Amino acid sequence: MYPDPQSRSAKLYARAREVVADGVSRTTIAMHPYPLYVTGGDGARIRDVDGNELIDFNNNYTSLIHGHARPEITEAVSAQLQHGAAFSFGTEAEIELAELLCARVPGFERIRFCNSGTEAVMNAIKAARAHTGRAKIAKCEGAYHGSYDYAEISLGVGPDHWGDAAQPAAVAYSKGTPQRAMDDVVVIPFNDIVASQRLIEENADQLACVLFDPVSSQVGMVGPAPGYLEMLRDVTRRHGILLVFDEVIAFRLGHGGAQQAYGVSPDITALGKIIGGGFPVGAVAGTAEAMAVFERNGGKAALPHGGTFNANPVTMVAGRAAMALMDETAFADLNALGERLRSQLREAFVLANEEGQVSGEGSLFKMHLHSRPLTGYREAWARPAEQARMAAIQRQLMNAGLFVSPTGLGCLSTAMSGAELDRLSEALVEALRATREGT
Ligand code: PMP
């Protein structure tokens, strides 16, 4: 049972704290009073150092579309490792993954690889700046785009700081963020067509790009309202602003990513997670015109872009193996499983007679402990009591052998079937009952 001060995880965490700042190298895996340590994973399951087995609905925060240790990926990586892991030269593996991705999405005429979604977003913003000669970006209130200063503005903001709904405040996420970064970010309210368009137009001559995640995990994980994306595409095009999609998570939505699912093509897309087959990855893809900033044309590129491990062949072969397995049928099957899980989880709220709803698209889901309409960031934002109860539910689920994130977010992998879905929806009924007020 978690927490157990005598567990091996608790002891490893105490040891880690002596050498690793805060004991972990990523905020997203920190848990109170200690994070779990694992020995490995296989398909949909992971095993922790205390011998507990968990069904993994987190999949390393959505990056593992096939779950753990999928043989085709392991074999591709093992074969590559026999020949070396990184070179200061090109490899054919890079071209092969680039060809696969560019063949799937019409807007991907050129691509560049890097090592994380954070880098992908940073490079997309820098590309938009280099292309337009403008400094500012616009992004949705509360949306998560990794940890580049500008992309972090307004992340996690609550009612104490968020200001006017029609003109959300540009709030720093980390202490020490330069005021200049806040000044260069225009925060727009997700799905509010009128206010967003007005804010973009007011800043049009200074905006390099609008950075947008069509299914932001922090903005309720709901898709864009009818007309919102079309408005973004239209207003950016009219003012020479680049439209940048962050599909680091949203590329999961289908064979051609979120842009195919929603029928709107951005100028640049930031990618990460699933395209690396479980290995560190990021990429910037876009039209040849937008991506021209990376071209040297015999001199220095407008946007020089280095990176010791960019396009390393281990990541490239893993990504290619993972994505090749995801043909149209595989996406359709996985997304159908997602639809089934969302409906089973909704049913669990009904069975437990508890207020709540489930959002998400494709193979993604997010549970909410309220019935406010999920129209925008402020409505979806979990109140402190809801956050605390969701964390308690997550713990209950963990003790029942099921792992979702503490914010109620999760995703499926191709290693799952109806059996795992049933386990989660049944356990949710129990967890809702066990955490009911007054129990
Ligand atoms: N954008 C989005 C939408 C993300 O969800 C994330 C990570 N969860 C990132 C960017 C950053 O990616 P990474 O963690 O690989 O830096």
Image (spheres, grey):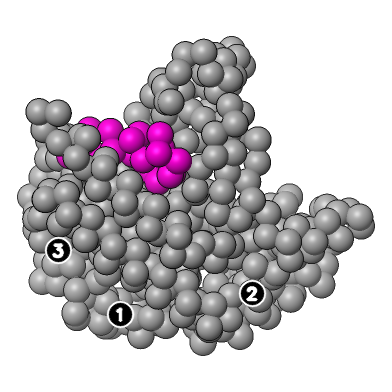
Left or right: residue 178 compared with residue 56: left
Say what amino acid the circle numbered 1 marks: Arg
The spot of residue 70 in percent (x, y) is: 68, 60
Q: Are marks 2 and 1 in contact (CB under 8 Å)?
A: no
Q: Which residue is mark 3?
A: 375
Q: Earlier in the sequence, mark 2 or mark 1?
A: 1
Provide residue 204's location: percent of width, then percent of height.
25, 69
Q: CA distance from mark 2 to mark 1?
A: 32 Å
Which residue is identified by label 1? 233
Name which residue lies at 34% across and 81% down: 262
Count residues near mark 2 (Cα–Cα under 10 Å), then give few for <14, some for 14-19, many for 20+. Answer: some
- Which element type, helix, strand or loop, lies under badge 1? helix
Is 353 situated left or right of 361 in this image?
left
Q: Say what secondary structure mark 2 lies in.
A: helix
Of labels 2 and 3, earlier in sequence is 2
Q: Earlier in the sequence, mark 3 or mark 1?
A: 1
In this rendered view, identify the residue nearer to me: 303 or 31.
Answer: 31
**Which portion, as a residue range, is magenta?**
386-405
Residue that carries the numbered disc 2 in the rendered image: 325
Q: Amino acid at mark 2?
A: Leu
Q: Which residue is drawn at the image coordinates 45% and 60% (left, top)?
A: 419
